Amino acid sequence: MNEALLKTLELLLIIFIGYLLQKKLHNKESIKGVKVIILSVALPATIFLALLKIQLDTTLLFLPFMALAFNLIMFGFSLYVLPLIFKADNLATHSTRSMLMPSLAPGLSCFPFIMAYLGDEQLAIAALADVGNKFFGLILLFLVATYWYQKRSVKNSNASSQKKLKDLGLSLLSEPINVVIVVAIILLIGGFSLDNLPIVLQSTIKKFSVIMIPLILLFIGLSVRINRSEFGKMIQLLSWRSGVAFILSGFALLLFPTLSAPMALVLIAFPQSSCSFWPFAHMCTVSQIEEIEGQLVPTFDQRFAINMLACSLPFSTMVIISIFYAGNVIVNPVIILSIGIVLIVGAILPKILPCVIRLGFIRRQSDLLKQSPLKQ
């Protein structure tokens, strides 16, 4: 069996096992305990390792900026264009999907296939591009989450803005994820890397990091609650997201027509990565603060976020497998742009088709009335 396909089946199987465990761990406190381990141990360890492994090649510095540009453009589309097509149920859902849609998790959904189909050299290029994506997911989305929380919190409370900001700052500084980001940045500025740390510390952090992917996938399986109507909405949103990503990749290929085929495949596949868990981590941080304050109207919809994460991983892996299966045939701006348009139209069609049918029915009834003998 193909190594990349085997990896995909492994990831999906872990999610399915988590889903089966819902009957055993139906207590909310049990699921919350898994989330605490992820956010306090596994994810901070992984982020710390990822930041300390960053080694920038000056000849490829444009790659992180390209990834960051994609994140920012997709964020703008999700924030301002998406609501015109898919109206959110409430402000919390709109904020949640605006955080998730532009985020990328290439480590789960893209890197295994780049390694299997293209090799280590292209994987290193994708990892370098991921630096820009990490900056967006870890730092910029964190700032967005705190801004939205502060804006809504002040609006719904009589407390002063200054006090709210102070309380929020203290709470966020105590979060393990934010602590390790600050420590890692300080070490990088000081010229330290992972190899400069004591062997025992390196080994311990790596062991904590290893459990992150299985725990996250189990947590998704444990938490997911998708009914048939929600599943259709998720597929529409993910199809729209994938279509926009294909169109952006098509324009990038037009801007850089001399790219090699493997590099072009990375450029196409990387933006198709599944939604990242990092925005959900920021949402959890804000939600914990809101629970303490007793805020009745949450800033984010965690259930919607979990359902989107659960649908995003298999959706993205199928798209990425299709890209690499097509290989050099798909490395054509016209083909990529066409795929993007088809996906966007396919996502919008279920929303506009009933309106078109209804309009046609009304016109038909109007014509029949005009031709009726009674009318004459």
Image (tube, rainbow, N blue to C red):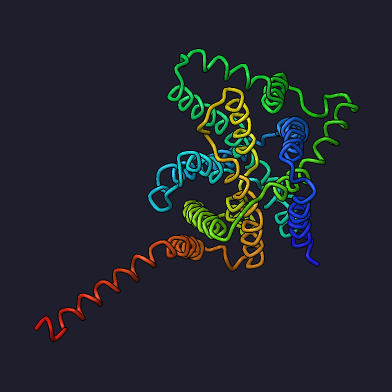
Would residue 37 appear left or right of 104 to someone viewing this image?
right
Q: Is residue 239 left or right of residue 185?
A: left
**204 to the left or right of 368:** right
Against 282, is 117 above or below?
A: below
The image shows residue 318, relative to residue 373, as above or below, that is above
Q: How many marks?
A: 0
Depth check: 268 or 89 in front? 89
- Identify whether 172 is placed above or below 4: above
Nearer to me, 18 or 110: 18
Quarter the C terminus occupies: bottom left
Residue 331 versus residue 309: which sits nearer the camera? 309
Q: Is residue 257 visible?
A: no
Residue 53: give x, y in percent of width and height.
74, 34
Q: Is residue 57 visible?
A: yes
| Extreme residue toward the left, this view | 376
Q: Residue visible at 50% across and 64% down?
A: 339
Residue farthest bottom in this picture: 373
Horizontal and vertical percent for residue 314?
A: 66, 57
Q: Position of residue 192 (x, y in %)?
A: 76, 23
**Quadrant of image for the N terminus:** bottom right
Q: Residue at x 71, y 25 (%)?
A: 176
Q: Is residue 19 left or right of residue 307?
A: right
- Residue at the image position 49 percent from the left and 45 percent from the top: 74
Q: Residue at x 57, y 58 (%)?
A: 231
